[in-house]
Image (spheres, rainbow, N blue to C red):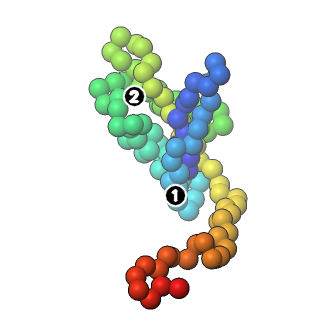
Amino acid sequence: MLVERSELTGGDFNYRVTKTIPAGDSPEEAQAKALEVARKHLPYGGARSCTREIYRSPDGVLRVVFKESWGYNTDDFRVSVAELIEAHEPDPPAEDETSRPRKFGRFRK
């Protein structure tokens, strides 16, 4: 599952992944977990005193909008269920002379 926060960049709104969460073993379990995250997640710990509105788009993405009492949108994020297809771990750095710990004292080499 991906939690994405909206950002205003270059005059356009874009979403950036801020958190990944294991979603479960079945599509139904994943959708239930996504709805739970949409109900409870607080971006940057804020928006506690705002109204939380949750929308489901036709592609299944949950969009969460926080509104102040006078109707002004203060923040939003979205939660989507996605399947991890690949993950590549970086190769460990090659050990060379400069990466060894330095020895100090009388018997250093």
Label 1: how many Cα within 10 Å (few below 14, some 14–19, many 20+): some
| Earlier-in-chain disc, 1 versus 2 | 1
Q: Is residue 91 above or below residue 51?
A: below
Res 52 label: 2
Q: Is residue 85 above or below residue 51?
A: below
Q: Residue at x 52, y 35 (%)?
A: 5
The foreground one among 90 and 60 is 90
Q: Is residue 79 left or right of residue 44?
A: right
Q: Which residue is mark 1?
A: 22
For marks 1 and 2, give the CA distance: 23 Å
The foreground one among 62 and 94 is 94
Task: Tell me where residue 4 appears, x and y as whole percent.
Answer: 55, 39
Q: Is residue 89 left or right of residue 101?
A: right
Amino acid type, callout 2: Arg
Name the secondary structure under disc 1.
Answer: loop
Q: Residue at x 51, y 48 (%)?
A: 19
